[in-house]
């Protein structure tokens, strides 16, 4: 029995009125006001949620320029973002057909990260912004959302958009991260500018050994670490995004309990 | 009435907050009392810690020197310093720049490992960056064990009168001189440029979907519910497809263009560097004195540690016991009048050590009672010794021959409490 057939007569009448209200300018004006409130609430929730989640799961990788290595940072960051984006996208897409969650999450994360770095790291603890600026993932969010908008398919967007989201972290950020990988000689040791900054700008409880620099078994293909990691991250991005779209569908199904309560 | 009550409550809360703020003092300790007593006694014995000078201006150089001995009584329940350790400096974040650090002459940009029962001489050179009053502690970050701090020394940093912004210049291997304070941030192709560009892209995309649609959340929800999932895609227009295609293409072009631009501008780059370095340890200069600990007791009421030891002098010069050091506290034998004391040095008990035997003559083997007694035991929470899971102590005894040459070695063993 389809959902349309299953609804009660009372609910059918209510739905008919809802549809009729879309032709009513006064109702539409009211809806727009509600929409404004909904956007504020949704964006505030996304901002807080992604900030907490990203801090807990990818924190130091995004705080310090000398943590963003070629292997772990491009893997950890997209994973932690995609699981949040996947869970949200399913509901917003199936109920509203708005392909905006990935862009909203990455843009809001970027804005709140800048606020946090400026207030907490620069003003409060005196780290230079050149050492603690956040990474950007906005381009990846746009690619993921656009894939969904163009293909109109969650599955295809997971295959293409999820893959691109995982694979392009390093190229996207390389445009402004490259200067920090320029070599420097210090005390007879080769270091990158980022390594030197990590040494000079003292972090009492973040010693050098806490960084996870290129620790893994992905060492084939003649040391082509960056492209190899990108391919692996792309594959994992597809899987993670697909899994959390499924989680989103499960969360979306919980509305039946809300209806019962109502 | 309600208004009055709110007003009163508000004023009272404000007053209470002001009083609390006025009463709140500076944070004067930075973990040196927080760790377990046994952890401080049996891990690293810091000594000769010296910070010079103690009054500087922003931009001036400060040197921190000292030595430490890694304890052979290292607690078994704690990850060892023999695995991975990093020489660090306990200051409030980057209020100083670290210009140089070394242990036994080896630069310490990277982590290392320290075998137990050896001496390590360290130097850390700092450059004052932010004005203020700081408690400077040398410290070791031991992997999985945490930070082991030496005693702190207060240091005053005044503002630089010139008012010039702080500059931290280095020269890269390709030959460019850069200021790390602002490097890579400004200009076309800098961090700010790219971030503003991407934020504009993100906001532009969101504005397209949220501000140009006549029907948004509630109307779309109503329509999709009516149309059903099969026809819901009809809400996406041709214009949406074109806009998405433009954003998709533009984004890919920006990523690719930015990547190629950076590759062209910075052709020589290297991955982040890591790895452990080796440090050759120094043997403890224990001289010709053999020390065997018989037993030790800790008297809670008297705040004193009593050690009964057997000492045999195998050398040809008489020896006097001058000092006992544990958990960064120096218990000094006032009768010996040896040892250096540094400007601003804390945690020193000038007559805290009594020794039952004045001289240990060459060839003599004698039972000696050392009593380290002072209120510092209480002040630095060493009385918690009896609550430790492994009730043992360790420390360094310093002794001198006739020529005033200093020797030292570690002593340790079980300690029994005396409650009353």
Image (spheres, grey):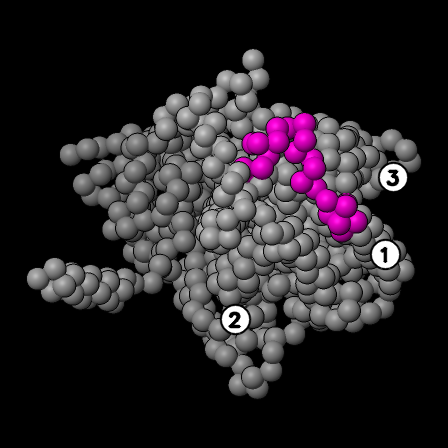
Magenta-colored span = B221-244
Q: Which residue lies under the disc numbered 1? A: B257
Q: Percent x, y for residue B329?
A: 37, 51
Q: Residues within 10 Å of mark 1 (few under 14, many from 20)?
A: some
On whether residue B226 falls in the magenta region, the answer is: yes
Q: Percent x, y for residue B276?
A: 70, 42
Q: Percent x, y for residue A72?
A: 71, 39
Q: Nearer the viewer, residue B322 or B411?
A: B411
Q: Residues within 10 Å of mark 3 (few under 14, many from 20)?
A: few
Direction left: furthest residue: B1
SS at circle 2: loop
Direction top: furthest residue: A1
Q: CA distance from mark 1 to mark 2?
A: 39 Å
- Name the chief secondary structure element in magenta: helix
Q: Nearer the viewer, residue B25 or B250?
A: B250
Q: CA distance from mark 2 to mark 3?
A: 42 Å
Residue at 69%, 35% (x, y): give it.
Answer: B233
Position of the N terminus of chain B by quadrant: bottom left
Q: Which mark is residue B130?
A: 2
Identify whether B114 is placed above or below A189: above
Q: CA distance from mark 1 to mark 3?
A: 21 Å
Q: Nearer the viewer, residue A115 or A122?
A: A115
- Asked if both marks, 2 and 3, belong to the same chain, the answer given is no
Direction bottom: furthest residue: B162
Determine whether, in the image, residue A184 is placed left or right of residue B263: left
On whether residue B116 falls in the magenta region, the answer is: no
Q: Which residue lies under the disc numbered 3? A: A224
SS at circle 1: helix
Identify whether B91 is placed above or below B217: below
Residue at 19%, 33% (x, y): give it.
Answer: B419
């Amino acid at each position: 029995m389809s959902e349309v057939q299953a609804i009660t007569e009372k609910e059918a009448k209510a739905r008919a009125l809802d549809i009729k209200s879309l032709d009513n300018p006064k109702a539409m004006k009211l809806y727009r006001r509600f929409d404004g409130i909904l956007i504020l609430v949704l964006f505030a929730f996304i901002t807080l949620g992604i900030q907490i989640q990203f801090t807990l799961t990818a924190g130091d990788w995004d705080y310090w320029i000398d943590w963003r290595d070629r292997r772990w940072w491009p893997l950890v960051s997209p994973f932690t973002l995609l699981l949040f984006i996947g869970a949200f996208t399913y509901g917003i897409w199936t109920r509203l057909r708005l392909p905006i969650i990935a862009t909203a999450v990455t843009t809001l994360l970027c804005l709140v990260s800048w606020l946090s770095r400026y207030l907490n790291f620069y003003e409060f603890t005196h780290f230079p912004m050149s050492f603690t600026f956040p990474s950007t993932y906005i381009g990846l969010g746009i690619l993921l959302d656009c894939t969904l908008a163009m293909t109109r398919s969650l599955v295809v967007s997971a295959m293409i958009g999820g893959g691109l989201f995982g694979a392009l972290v390093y190229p996207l950020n390389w445009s402004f991260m490259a200067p920090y990988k320029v070599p420097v000689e210090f005390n007879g040791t080769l270091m990158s500018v980022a390594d030197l900054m990590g040494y000079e700008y003292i972090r009492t409880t973040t010693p050098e050994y806490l960084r996870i620099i290129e620790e893994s078994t992905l060492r084939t293909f003649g040391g082509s670490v960056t492209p190899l990691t990108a391919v692996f991250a792309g594959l994992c991005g597809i899987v993670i995004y697909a899994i959390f779209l499924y989680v989103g569908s499960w969360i979306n199904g919980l509305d039946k309990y809300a209806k019962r309560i109502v | 009435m309600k208004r009055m009550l709110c007003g009163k409550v508000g004023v009272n809360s404000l007053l209470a907050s002001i009083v609390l703020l006025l009463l709140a003092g500076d944070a004067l300790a930075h973990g040196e009392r927080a760790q377990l007593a046994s952890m401080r006694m049996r891990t690293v014995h810091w000594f000769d810690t010296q910070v010079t000078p103690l009054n500087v201006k922003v931009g001036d150089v400060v040197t921190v020197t000292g030595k430490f001995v890694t304890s052979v009584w290292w607690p078994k329940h704690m990850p060892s310093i023999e695995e991975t350790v990093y020489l660090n400096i306990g200051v409030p974040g980057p209020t100083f720049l670290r210009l140089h650090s070394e242990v036994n002459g080896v630069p310490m940009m990277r982590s290392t490992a320290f075998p137990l029962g050896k001496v390590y001489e360290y130097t850390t050179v700092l450059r004052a960056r932010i004005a203020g009053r700081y408690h400077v502690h040398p410290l070791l970050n031991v992997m999985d064990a945490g930070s082991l701090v030496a005693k702190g020394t207060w240091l005053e940093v005044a503002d630089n009168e010139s008012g010039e912004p702080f500059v931290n210049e280095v020269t890269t291997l390709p030959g460019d001189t850069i200021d790390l304070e602002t490097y890579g941030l400004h200009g076309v192709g800098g961090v700010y440029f790219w971030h503003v560009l991407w934020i504009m892209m993100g906001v532009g995309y969101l504005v397209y979907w949220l501000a140009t649609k006549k029907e948004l959340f509630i109307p779309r929800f109503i329509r999709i519910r009516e149309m059903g999932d099969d026809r819901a895609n009809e809400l996406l227009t041709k214009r949406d497809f074109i806009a998405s295609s433009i954003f998709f293409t533009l984004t890919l072009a920006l990523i690719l263009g930015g990547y190629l631009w950076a590759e062209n501008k910075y052709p020589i780059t290297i991955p982040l560097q890591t790895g452990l370095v080796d440090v050759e340890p120094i043997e403890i200069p224990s001289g010709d004195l053999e020390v065997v600990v018989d037993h030790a007791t800790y008297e809670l009421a008297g705040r004193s540690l009593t050690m009964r030891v057997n000492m045999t002098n195998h050398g040809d010069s008489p020896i006097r016991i001058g000092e006992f050091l544990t958990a960064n506290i120096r218990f000094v034998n006032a009768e010996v009048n040896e040892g250096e004391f540094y400007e601003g040095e804390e945690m020193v008990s000038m007559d805290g050590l009594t020794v039952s035997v004045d001289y240990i003559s060459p060839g003599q083997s004698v039972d000696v009672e050392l009593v380290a007694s002072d209120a510092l035991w209480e002040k630095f929470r060493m009385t918690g010794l009896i609550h430790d899971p492994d009730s043992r102590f360790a420390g360094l005894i310093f002794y001198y021959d006739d020529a005033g040459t200093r020797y030292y070695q570690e002593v340790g063993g079980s300690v029994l409490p005396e409650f009353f």
